[in-house]
Image (tube, rainbow, N blue to C red):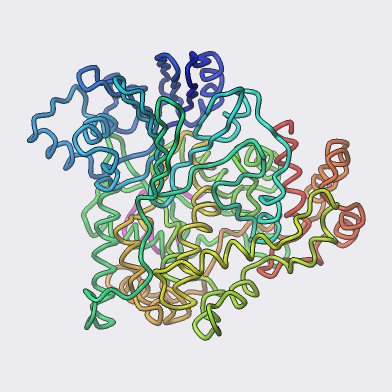
Amino acid sequence: MCGFAGELRVGELADVEAVTRMAATMDDRGPDGSGTWASGPLALSFRRLKIIDLSENGSQPMTDPELGLTISFNGCIYNYPELRKELSQKGYRFFSTSDTEVLLKGYHCWGERFVDRLKGMFAFCLTERDTGRVILGRDRLGIKPLYLSEAGGALRFASTLPALLAGGGVDTSIDTVALHHYLMFHAVVPAPYTMLKGVRKLAPGTLLVIEPDGSRREVRYWSPSFSRNPAHAGMSADDWEEAVLEALRVAVERRMVSDVPVGVLLSGGLDSSMIVGLLAEMGQPDLQTFSIGFETVGDIEGDEFEFSDIIAEHYGTKHHRFRVSSDRMLPALDGAIHAMSEPMVSHDVVAFYLLSEEVAKHIKVVQSGQGADEIFAGYDWYPPLADANGDGLNTYEAEFFDRPHAEMSEVLNPEYRVEKDVSRAFVAKHFGKPGAASPLDRALRLDTEVMLVDDPVKRVDNMTMAWGLEARVPFLDHDLVELAAACPPELKLKGGGKGVLKEASRQVIPAEVIDREKGYFPVPALKHLEGPYLNLVKSALLAPAARERGIFRKEYIDKLLGEPNDHSTRLGSNKLWQIALLELWLQSRGI
């Protein structure tokens, strides 16, 4: 788990100084070492977090002179020991014990579709010395980020968006399509867009192959089927529960591969509790677990320690509880916003940021429960889709979109509006792809491939890596995701959502955790804006930079500031916080 940056030119030498400057912004992602490599038109720079092969043999950028390959890689390949053994049997010789070197040998052996054999999270840049070909790649679920920009005739790429800004020459004007998605599609901005016109991101499950003459081609190497698989015909509900439990068990065990200890972020909910229970079942010794809570504000409870304590005590983990006082929240919010590669509205961003700060004092790797709600239909917008008419588009929009398209004329000044409802058009196109059998299947596919990537997954990566902490997400093991995609929707919806997972979990964890009301990371101070938090919002929206930029209509800002807690999106988010967060993020980056 690290951060890397690079630049590729055609017929010119790469700007090594710019690439080094870009990588220097990511020392939080990789505090344990750095390296730079350049050869003609390509330069790579790297920041390292030592997790596998703690020696200098695992340093990057890594070059294999015998094979003529060089790579920079962010992530972890969980099945690298098995792949290494297979490659050794084919005659490949290894100079390190790292998963990075396995990628080099794997590419040489199997070609660009070597990614099909990888089980893990990754983003990489790999280049061939003899041909000059360069390949950029991103893992199937987009767990690891990869941003792109065109600047001064060069293609630049990096693990974070701010790294590209540090390279200079980026068009930082607002992309109006991305802005529309941000305000309509629950703050989700799908690839390739970002909020800035000059920055794009590689889509998950995709390779970008660049030839020496600059020609490019994209290869989409993975997309799960959400249709019923004939191979599963005849499976009973019990069979599905057993299959899900076994797949999750394998996913959790895979994510223990490490040369340093691995802990668990324990919220007290079903998902993280299952991870702890399965690790305990495997006999994992001295397991460390971590929970966070906030001061209660009014009638809004600030923690779920009652449930995390049940799991910690039941399994005898070495448990750490962190209660955050209100006076820590405001400065932490500034840090969390600065850590965002893209603006993130969810209140639990600051919770992950603060939790990661504390956890990083004890450990360098954790497992986390993100993804279960998206792949097992745990959210409350899924049940209405079971009875939706037609393709389900109208129902999905009514449940998930933040506001009707017509409201945009009230929110945005004319130069920032798009005439067409591009968010609805995006969902319609996604729903129209083959491979999803019902409205619910289409929604789950969309949320798995898009919403999950550009909301919770990105949030966890950004907030943990801000403190040099590696987060692993077993519910996004692609074998488990494929199994969940094939599972009959009615089994997922059972019991109010995540039914098949809940029933499977009864073999592992206490019932009071399974049958509790669904919870979220509670951050009371951001649910009800008042006092210093309201002042922060007001200052951002009325700042000279915001007035000069002029994204939001003055009348709309005045209305929300006059009634700061009276206007919510369809899913209950505060509309004032949504627009303010965008301005706070832009201003934190000097845009």
Q: Main secondary structure of the magenta part?
A: helix
Residue at 55% x, 74% y: name it. Answer: 380
Q: Is residue 399 above or below residue 563?
A: below
Q: Nearer the viewer, residue 476 or 65?
A: 65
Please say whether residue 506 is visible from this viewpoint.
yes
The answer to if 313 sits in the magenta stretch is yes
**Quadrant location of the N terminus?**
top left
Q: Nearer the viewer, residue 156 or 315?
A: 156
**Quadrant location of the C terminus?**
top right
- Decide if residue 89 is on the left or right side of residue 389: left
Quadrant of res 545: top right
Q: Is residue 452 above or below residue 46?
A: below
Residue at 55% x, 63% y: name it. Answer: 520
Percent x, y for residue 590? 73, 31
Q: Is residue 227 above or below residue 286?
A: below
- Decide if residue 572 is on the left or right side of residue 6: right
The answer to if 409 sits in the magenta stretch is no
Residue at 51% x, 31% y: name it. Answer: 157
Please say whether residue 363 is visible from this viewpoint.
no
Quadrant of res 275: bottom left
Percent x, y for residue 402? 69, 65
Residue at 51% x, 17% y: name it. Answer: 20
Percent x, y for residue 139? 38, 46
* Segment colored magenta: 307-321
